[in-house]
Image (cartoon, rainbow, N blue to C red):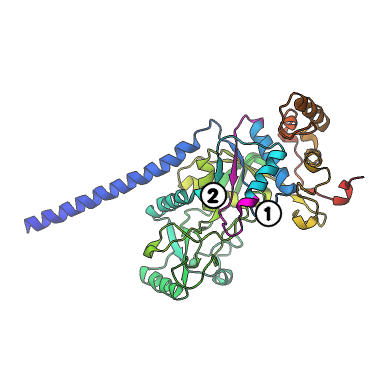
Amino acid sequence: METGGDGMMRAEAVQVAQAAQAAEAQAAQAGELAEVASGGQRGAGRYAPSPSGDLHLGNFRTAVLAWLFAKYEGREFRMRIDDIDAQRSSEESAKQQLRDLATMGIGYEGRLWRQQECWSEYEKALEALRARGLVYECYCSRKDIAEAVRAPHAAPGAYPGTCRELGESERAAKRAELAARGRVPALRLRAGVDEWEVRERFAVGGGVYRGAVDDMVLRRGGNAPKGAGAGVGAGADVGAGAPDSGDAGAGAGASAGGADAGGQVNRDYAYNLAVVVDDALAGVGQVVRGDDLLSSAPRQAYLAHLLGLPPVEYVHVPLVLGPDGKRLAKRDGAVTLRDFPGGAQGMLRWIADSLGEAVDVSAAEAAGVAGAAGAADAAGAGGITPAALLRTFRPELLPREPVTWRPAENAED
Ligand SMILES: [Zn+2]
């Protein structure tokens, strides 16, 4: 009896020690990220294009603003290729975008970041949350979610919590049901709040934006990864992508790598998870992006909080609209760098004019010419450059309304 009891205690002690070790490793992981993040003194600014086609006028305006906000405060500036959606991203497009940004005089410090190189970091973050019981499987289809009954105060589109409290046997049954159709469940965050506050210094008065947080998707479900059953490709049923804006289009991701239960692999990490990890890795402290992403900021900031990462400051700027009053798109014509009237200089002038009182365009023009004579500014042979605009930049005077691109007004004589 005694020996038996002793043996049991020893086994328990080993278990406790193992658990402590796991917790320590996990804390070290979180610490790793936090350490990288505090690398810069104030945190860098950044621009993060999705390489799924040419950048257009609206993207460039946001990029120029992100650069100006960062440099105005002496922050470094990071560049990241948001290629988490492998199917919609191409290397050719990434290269072209970087060339175009350089032509526009938008440079960056440090290495070029790419989401495709960060899978293991997303997995670590997911594991850290899972180890704390903050991750659960969701078996719902889009239709299930759309048809679910919600609490009266729930935010529109918020996940209704259908799978949050399922028991293990129910889960096993639903998992098997999906597997029989060659599909895998999504993973959701067990959120402990339904609202979160972020520092937003532009889009709202008071410097604070408060918005809804729900049990967001951390990794999408959908078709089982290749080799794991029927269906190839990422047919994500349950999506939690960010709307496609100047920041990042985030649809379904790739399906490969990242060991899952049963030896399967699934890399369909949600944009909300990836962006938080990415920004921390690159030491980003300020996020300037299109205001269509404002409502997703509280979710991202809450995730950062759970992962022990420092909060970023947000600056959500209005989007450029097309002549039809909708978000500018390539169908609006002549909005990429190659076909814009007057090329890079024409586009920089239009962007400068769109910043209203926040910059002095003629002073920037004179400074740009002077700078070019002395060799410095990146956009080349004189004229307006972001560096020249920076000399008179006054962010508090930026117009708060969206600006509209009207091709007719910009046609060359
Ligand atoms: Zn569900």
**Near-viewer residue (160 or 322):** 322
**Near-viewer residue (240 or 64):** 64
Q: Which residue extends farthest right?
A: 413
Q: Residue 313: percent from the left, percent from the top?
A: 59, 40
Q: Dot 1 corresponds to which residue? A: 53
Marks 2/1: CA distance? 17 Å
Asked if one can make out residue 378 in the rendered structure from this viewpoint, the answer is yes
Callout 1: SS: loop
Vertical relation: 177 (above or below) 112: below
- The label number, if any, that marks residue 286 in the structure image: none
Question: Where, by quadrant of the figure, is residue 381 drawn?
Answer: top right
Q: Is mark 1 within 8 Å of ligand 1?
A: no
Callout 2 amino acid: Gln
In the rendered view, does 384 fall on the left or right side of 75?
Answer: right
In the rendered view, does 46 fall on the left or right side of 39?
Answer: right
What residue do we see at 41% from left, 68% from top?
A: 166
What residue do we see at 53% from left, 32% from top?
A: 40
Vertical relation: 393 (above or below) 100: above
Vertical relation: 8 (above or below) 173: above
Label located before the other in sequence (2 or 1): 1
Is residue 84 shown in magenta? yes
Is residue 34 shown in magenta? no
Callout 1 amino acid: Gly
Region in magenta: 72-93
How packed mark 2 is, by other alpha carbons closer than 10 Å (few <14, some 14-19, many 20 or more), is many
What residue do we see at 79% from left, 54% from top?
A: 322
What residue do we see at 55% from left, 59% from top?
A: 253
- The label number, if any, that marks residue 115 in the structure image: 2
Question: Where, by quadrant of the figure, is residue 202 drawn?
Answer: top right
Q: Residue 116: percent from the left, percent from the top?
A: 53, 51
Quadrant, the N terminus: bottom left
